Amino acid sequence: MNIDIVGISRDLAPAQGVFAEQVNAQNQFISDPSMRVINMYGAGREGANALSQRFYFLIDPDGTLVWKNVTNQLIPVEALIGQLAEVVG
């Protein structure tokens, strides 16, 4: 399965590194402090303390949304890969 898993949050890179260590993340993270990309996918929260929600999206190489999970729950990488494998076959 040729899939790159990327986490995007408005946190700066040092904070993302701490989070990655805490949850033993095996993926890369991208910092989006302006929430431009986060809001493009509807994963932002409104308000003064705007945060991103924990949503998952599978986007094909053409930019088409193929699958999403918007439960706002952390999915362990092994379980996420299993769910994605069902989608991509």
Image (cartoon, rainbow, N blue to C red):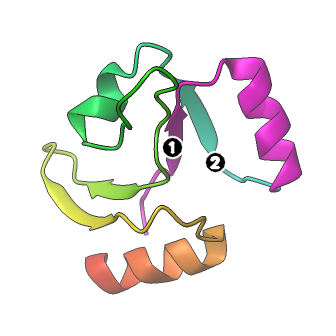
Residue 53 among those drawn in magenta: no
Residue 38 at what x, y percent from top left? 35, 33
| Residue 7 occupies quadrant | top right
Residue 53 x %, y %: 46, 47
Task: Give whichever of discs 2 and 1 has the lower sequence position.
Answer: 1
Q: Residue furthest top?
A: 34
Q: Residue at x 69, y 20 (%)?
A: 13
Tag 2 and tag 1, C-beta contact below 8 Å? yes
Quarter of the figure with the C terminus: bottom left
Read off the residue under disc 1.
6
- Magenta residues? 1-23
Q: Position of residue 50 (x, y in %)?
A: 46, 28
Residue 89 seen by the camera: no
Q: Mark 1 is on which residue type?
A: Val
Q: Residues within 10 Å of mark 2 (few under 14, many from 20)?
A: few
**Three-letter amino acid code at the position of disc 2:** Asn
**In this rendering, position of residue 16 left or right of residue 66:** right
Crowd band around label 1 with a 10 angstrom C-alpha radius: few (<14), some (14–19), many (20+): few
Visible residue check, residue 66: yes
- Residue under numbered circle 2: 27
